[in-house]
Amino acid sequence: MGDHLTKSGHGTVPALRWEEPPDGPVLVLLDQTRLPHEEVELACTDVPALVLAIRTLAVRGAPVLGLAGAYGIALAAARGYDVDDAAGVLAHARPTAVNLGYGVRRALAAFRSAGPGQGAAAALAEARRLHAEDAAASAAMAAHGVRLLAELALGGGYRILTHCNTGALVSGGEGTALGVVLAAHRAGELRRLWVDETRPLLQGARLTAWEAARAGMPYTLLADSAAGSLFTAGEVDAVLIGADRIAADGSTANKVGSYPLAVLARYHHVPFVVVAPTTTVDPATPDGAAIEVEQRPGSEVTDLAPSPLGTQAYNPAFDVTPPELITAIVTENGVASPVTAESLAAVCVRKDAR
């Protein structure tokens, strides 16, 4: 299935990479469940191992799930799996993140259109192409996002609140929302990054704080429920989040806890900005009500702190923010603002078809 390989040092460890040792190809993932205390890589040599890694959040984040899906098709083809069956299992490993199915479909189309005996190579080439595109999209979103922050006239030294994790761990590049924050930091414009801990799995405390510390950002961790007091004190200039699926009307599904931040931001007249590549926009999903929200195991909540035996837990992985609460959606092609079906469609023209 999958083997764990321990890494050491403080160099940049990619979220995933493809390797071809003598005993066959392998997709190597940085196991995000082991961060921040251990940098451990998970070597996926077969499709079941990759599906398990996706479901258990060893690899997570919308853009990188698209890459995992594409590389998963290449792995299936190279290892002799029924590629169509593998595609179905991979695409449905997590239901909300639209990029996962997108990556699967792109690599599957390349596999099917290849000549005899060339399917595995074609799928791998398409996965690598998607990987490069995502890195380029990350850089473009950072540039557009920093420009937007300047246009919003927030004053010198931004104080930005973020939720969940949106850096290099979720991307082929430097990330989505956290990529914008990193660009602002490099430009000397980041006064403070406020990091929601992001319960129940603490992606903010474990992952975003880890990435911020490695980048030398000035950051402060807070309990999710403390965000309101920050707004009241006037300590937030903007909220930047990522997305797992954006409907055609701009409704945005992101890690649960994002919607309350949007409500707080609107009440306190603070810009609420979504940063995501166009691959996360799903024109086949008309609005927020049509977004399937993944329900995670209740044990993720009850195990966070001791709960009485038999306690039931409500544990949606995501919530949905309506477009009227979103100031702007930043993509690699530009910024949609105000957020409407028309403005979003205008920045989502791309060469590939779903």
Image (cartoon, rainbow, N blue to C red):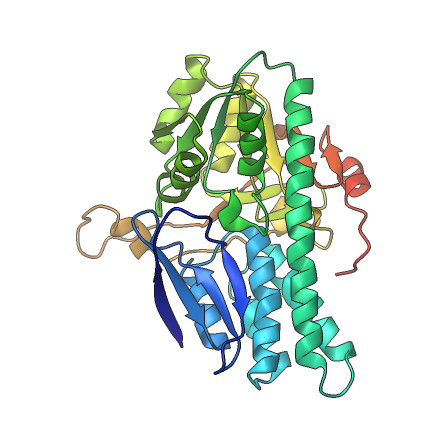
Position of 55 relative to 84 (above/below)? above
Quadrant where the image shows the C terminus: bottom right
Q: Is residue 135 visible?
A: yes
Q: Write the residue at 33% across / 47% down.
A: 36
Position of 171 relative to 180 (above/below)? below
Residue 251 x/y as whole percent? 64, 41
Position of 230 relative to 289 (above/below)? above
Quadrant where the image shows the N terminus: bottom left
Q: Quadrant of residue 323?
A: top right
Q: Nearer the viewer, residue 249 or 35?
A: 35
Residue 287 x/y as whole percent? 67, 46
Q: Nearer the viewer, residue 257 or 35?
A: 35
Q: Nearer the viewer, residue 327 or 335?
A: 335
Q: Quadrant of residue 39?
A: bottom left
Residue 152 x/y as whole percent? 66, 18
Q: Write the residue at 35% across / 48% down.
A: 201
Residue 253 x/y as whole percent? 56, 45
Tag count in the figure?
Answer: 0
Q: Is residue 280 visible?
A: no
Q: Nearer the viewer, residue 72 or 292?
A: 72
